[in-house]
Amino acid sequence: MPSRIPCFAADTESLSPFFPLAQMRHFGFFSQAFAKELSQSAEFSFAPGDDTLEITIEGRGPSFHDAITKLAGELEVDQSHISALRKVDRFFPGTGTLLKTDFHREKEGEISIYYQTQLSLKLASSCAHLLGLPAFPSGEIAALGKLLGRKGVYMGIDLMHGGAPACAIFFPIPAGSAREILLPGLLTAMEILSCDGWQKSLIGRRHNELISSASGDLFISVLFRDMLVKAIKIDYENVPVPRAYQVLKELEIERNEIIRMVNIAGALGTRTLSYFGIKLAAGRPALPKFYFKRPYWAAGDEVELFARYLESSYFRI
């Protein structure tokens, strides 16, 4: 483990051989606009074969959401989409919110906003309507939720330069339920979403092993654009790197990309992925993603750190 106290600056320095953030578009604006949130925690995520680094932070309140809309303007997101986001925000006053921002040297950035509260499909439909999306597939999502034992959902919004918004719908599954009763419903949901037989076989064989270390929620998500995308993403919590390595070999991920993931884990001083994501869609290779969540705190902030820990999924009943 690194001897220095973890902080965002130290982590970005450790990641610079893999992701030179100082050279990436909008990173300076982002790091200044969200300095307060970045002093508390950050999550780094990336996919094999992609030079994009995603950084996720958590915040709440008007000033945080104002900063998000300013970042969207910096990324040249269409002003009508930014206005729609402001309207959606009004449904979630004071709600803890996650912001994920993509960084790449050449590509335009993208942001995702995730509201950390469970909502009804009716409210999710109203938000999608404000974003200008076509008829929300409430019936299809309700059917998937029934298979997964969930009625309420979490919602995320994807915004990008030159593209239409998209809406992500998340089903949070408590770890106990994920271990005991989820798998049959999950496999049926994958079939409804047209996942290939080999993908169902992979999840059937590996699900219980991947969920064995989880202490919080398992997240299963689908994406809605002009219609429900025929794909599903599963995010497994607290997966040891050696366990992820075995799955990556089955997915035939190139060895140099596996080594890169291991080296990044080493640079951050951990042997565990905060989340190991797998996106599955018909006719396409399974796409893994690696997440490393980093808590930061300064001297004297132990009370704040403990309060945040108590609010986390580790203490959910």
Image (tube, rainbow, N blue to C red):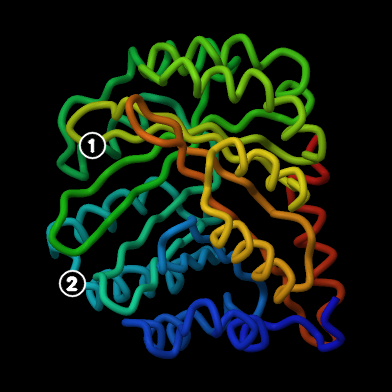
- Against 15, residue 288 (above or below) is above
Q: Residue at x 59, y 66 (%)?
A: 260
Q: Quadrant of the C terminus?
A: top right
**Image quadrant where residue 277 sits:** top right
Identify the residue position indicated by label 2 in the image. Answer: 76
First reached walking from the N terminus: tag 2 or tag 1: 2
Label 2 element class = loop
Q: State the separation of the CA atoms marked 2 and 1.
A: 20 Å
Q: Position of residue 114 (x, y in %)?
A: 46, 50
Label 1 element class = loop
Q: Residue at x 43, y 12 (%)?
A: 191
Q: Residue at x 60, y 36 (%)?
A: 250
In front of the other: 39 or 249 = 249
Q: Position of residue 56 (x, y in %)?
A: 52, 64
Neighbourhood count class around disc 1 (C-alpha, 10 Å): few under 14, some 14–19, many 20 upward? some
Q: Is residue 206 rendered to the left or right of residue 78?
A: right
**Image quadrant where residue 13 sits:** bottom right
Identify the residue position indicated by label 1 in the image. Answer: 225
- Against 268, residue 171 (above or below) is above
- Name the amino acid type tagged 2: Glu
